[in-house]
Amino acid sequence: MRKISIFGSTGSVGRSTVSLVQRHKSAYEILALSGCSNVELLAQQARDLRPNFAVIADENRLDELCRALEGSGVSAVGGREALLEAAELPVDWFMSAIVGIAGLEVSLKAAGSARVLALANKESLVCGGFLLKRICAENGCTLIPVDSEHSALFQIFEAVNYDGIENVFLTASGGPFLRSPIEQLASVTPEQAANHPNWNMGTRISIDSASMFNKAMELIELKELFPIEWRKFQVLIHPQSLVHGIVSFVDRGMFAQIGPTDMRHPISVALNWPERREQGLQPVDLTKLGPLEFERPDVSKFPALEQAELVMELGGLAGAVFNGAKERAADLFISRKIRFTEMAEIVGKVLNRHARRVSGKQSQFDLPAVRSADLWARSVFDEIAGTP
Ligand code: NAD
Ligand code: MG
């Protein structure tokens, strides 16, 4: 039996992961499941999958979780310390699907004790790529990306090597405002921004998709994952979300990966790697597809894409600064304190201030440095936005 843990099991990626595991329950021994505040769902998952531990990150909900798990034989634990301790339990496979910077330390702990780290939490690579890769290398932990585009490229690079690559294309649906005139963006609401046309995801990543902050994060994630010069990366808008990644070569040949628009597919690739398993997903019927469209993004409408280039150019802690600023931006936009367009405007200013304060390239850093870069970015964001 394979020992596994699923962190962030109550979220969108987490629920999809649980559903795949439920199909083949007898193949797995579950060590830990984690959630943050949804006690009811966490308890329901724990009663079904019988992990050794159910971890609730919000300590104030622990009593509630204990009551919900009474008599189940599952140990309920709570709080940040308990979360990090549970992340260190040795497993064959670990799903890191907490949202935001809160997932970074969990990924770092897991990289130190898991054999395979399935990484949905893109913030781990964007903010702490250097640390995460070092811990993986030291512990022989295999890192498998779960983000659909990176999973696509991971699958392509299993078939081809890195020689002769001309470009790596990162596809993007374009989000809900792809066809909206730029003048309208200042007045869109959080509800409109969270309404993604193709993917059913958590609120934060949906809003990040509307602003293309998500694609910007994915460019940086791509740079951290694969040994390819980042200037070869190109974002391609592909509204059908069927082609998830494309690699072109100097001889003009191309490889593209097509898969269902369903996160259970990339999760399944990571869960079963290096094998493949039938998971009950709907097949992609090529004969029923309409035209597949590809176009270049409008960077004046989505400045986050150029900001990602500056982050990749700067390296070091620029990813942590970028992520901290854009997380703060999303929080303030969701609470209607800033406009949609102000998110990228102010993130750009925070990033420029960071670029002015760093001298030379800093490629190595530790976790406290990531934390202080994150806090610095949030406070500079507030200062520029004029919010407390
Ligand atoms: P979500 O908001 O649906 O779920 C987040 C999970 O994290 C929940 O289980 C929640 O309880 C937990 N969590 C939140 N804050 C926490 C904290 N402070 N401490 C501990 N746990 C906390 O998010 P999601 O959409 O599933 O995304 C998870 C990660 O996967 C993100 O990094 C996202 O960018 C990435 N991702 C998601 C998708 C998708 O389709 N949803 C696709 C690709 C990548
Ligand atoms: Mg993605």
Image (tube, rainbow, N blue to C red):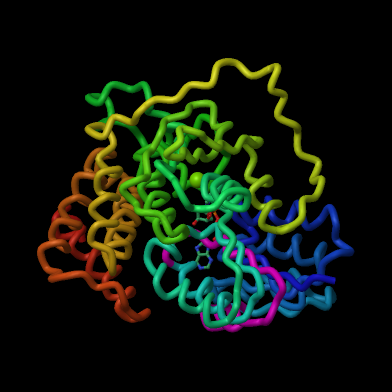
Residue 386 visible: no
Per the rendered image, the range of residues in magenta is: 79-101
Foreground residue, 352 or 236? Answer: 236
Can you name the residue that lies furthest to the left here?
A: 356
In the rendered view of the protein, which quadrant contains the N terminus? bottom right
Q: Residue at x 78, y 57 (%)?
A: 21
Q: Residue at x 74, y 69 (%)?
A: 68
Is 334 situated left or right of 49 in this image? left
Expressed as whole percent of the image width and height from the top left, the position of residue 228 reads 41, 54
In the rendered view of the protein, which quadrant contains the C terminus? bottom left
The quadrant holding residue 67 is bottom right
Can you name the residue that lies furthest to the front here?
A: 251
Q: Is residue 182 above or below residue 105?
A: above
Expressed as whole percent of the image width and height from the top left, the position of residue 123 reads 43, 61
Expressed as whole percent of the image width and height from the top left, the position of residue 223 reads 39, 56
The quadrant holding residue 88 is bottom right
Is 252 situated left or right of 280 in this image? left
Q: Is residue 121 above or below residue 115?
A: above
